[in-house]
Amino acid sequence: MQIWEDFKSGLILENPLLRLMIGLCSALAVSTRVENALFMGFSVIFVLTCSNVIISLIRRIVPEKARIPIFIVVIASFVTIVDLTLKAYFPPVYEQLGVWIPLIVVNCIILGRAEAFASKHPVLRSMADGLGKGLGYTSVLFIMGTIRELSGTGEIVAFGAKLFYLKPYFEPPKIMVMFPGAFFTFGLLMGLLNWIQRREGR
């Protein structure tokens, strides 16, 4: 079924981070902690899916020359919802994510899928594409956040609870929660995915 294929492609074969290499700046910056990674990931899923749906609905009435500004306005509307919600109900997370939430407006994943897919396909396929790409982005962000927080701080703390603790057993290298650690972790994940796909002959 085409809708399932649209959804599934975003998870691995067309993963925004590991395959399309878009949205990297925010991913590298916010993946220092699992909690930050999850909130950023869910924000992208919400904005990407909702934007895809609206843009697909209005695609036949949007003037060709005005499509990009209109797409940005649609995306910015949903980003504003996310921004105000986090600011009102999750102030600590809002402070941690900082400027990266407003910058979702110009994230290449969101605008790219609006232009390349949602503006050319019906609503259900656009929704599936948004969900798939969003979940693909979030899954990589979550894995990076887990690796970096655990190896860089010796513990995983999320939603006010200490979920995992390694500190008595080793001294965590602080570089893992810095930008070199982000590039190192991302490179490892890319290498692992390439190795798995070569073994499967894909």
Image (spheres, rainbow, N blue to C red):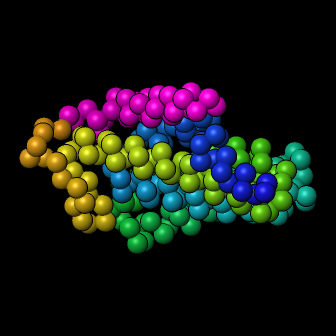
Residue 190 visible in the picture: no
Residue 47, image x and y in percent?
61, 59
Q: Nearer the viewer, residue 72 or 60?
A: 60
For the point 16% across and 48% down, the residue is 166
Residue 196 visible in the picture: yes
For the point 42% across and 71% down, the residue is 88
Would you say residue 35 sits in the magenta stretch? no
Quadrant into which the N terminus falls: bottom right
Give the main secondary structure, helix, strand or loop, of the magenta stretch.
helix
Q: Nearer the viewer, residue 154 or 7?
A: 7
For the point 46% across and 32% down, the residue is 192
* Above or below for 164 versus 191: below
Give the magenta-colored segment's residue range. 173-202
Residue 175 sits in quarter:
top left
Q: Nearer the viewer, residue 144 or 64?
A: 144
- Toward the front, the furthest residue is 200
Residue 140, image x and y in percent?
48, 45
Residue 21, image x and y in percent?
58, 34
Q: Nearer the viewer, residue 180 or 128?
A: 128
* Above or below for 177 versus 4: above
Quadrant into which the C terminus falls: top right
For the point 89% across and 47% down, the residue is 64
Would you say residue 197 sits in the magenta stretch? yes
- Toward the left, the furthest residue is 168
- Toward the bottom, the furthest residue is 89
